[in-house]
Image (cartoon, helix red, strand yellow):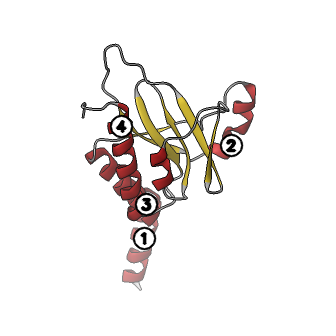
Amino acid sequence: MEYLIIILVVALALAPLSHFVPSKRQRAVARMRESAALKGLFVEFRQLPGQSGPDAVRSTRGNEGVIYYGKRLPPARGVSIPRGSWVRLEEDWRSTRGTDTPPESLAGLPVSVLAASVDEGSCGIYWRESGGPEDLAQIIAVIESWAASLRPGQG
């Protein structure tokens, strides 16, 4: 009986610590982010492209968990990269600006990707990290080739 009471007291003392143990999903996401970082990408929370102004504040609830995986572009003297952003609708990509045609490399992205954008500093994709390692490998390959096509001869 004494051992049962000791085990119960120890279990009650350790129970709050179980909240700090990462779940399987959290460990998988951490592995994906680490893999992306090792391949030269950066990962950050960003708002989906095409959402700015007062409407964006109201719509951020639907954007929770949206992560940007991007590749930094080296600065180039005299060459500017036109900004662009595209949102995935079913199997097609639609420009948030209306006239920009999406890069051909976006066709190789998995369906879990929500949007893509490019600016002077980086190019990358937006997703909720809902895919697995295969999707991540596909995303890394597409971003690498996209970045290389934006800055030919540089990294």
Secondary structure at badge 4 equals helix
* Upstream in sequence: badge 4 or badge 3: 3
- Identify the residue under disc 1: 11
Q: Nearer the viewer, residue 121 or 103?
A: 103
Return the x and y of residue 134 as percentages of the image width and height: 39, 64
Spatial separation of the CA atoms under disc 2 and disc 1: 38 Å
- Identify the residue under disc 3: 135
Residue 149 to residue 15: above or below: above
Q: Nearer the viewer, mark 3 or mark 2?
A: 3
Q: Nearer the viewer, mark 1 or mark 3?
A: 3
Spatial separation of the CA atoms under disc 3 and disc 2: 25 Å
Q: Residue at x 38, y 63 (%)?
A: 133
Secondary structure at badge 3 equals helix
Identify residue type, mark 2: Arg
Secondary structure at badge 2 equals helix
State left or right for residue 17 relative to residue 75: right
- Identify the residue under disc 2: 61
Spatial separation of the CA atoms under disc 2 and disc 4: 34 Å
Look at the numbered discs 3 and 2 and tell me whether their residues touch, using CB distance below 8 Å: no
Identify residue type, mark 1: Ala
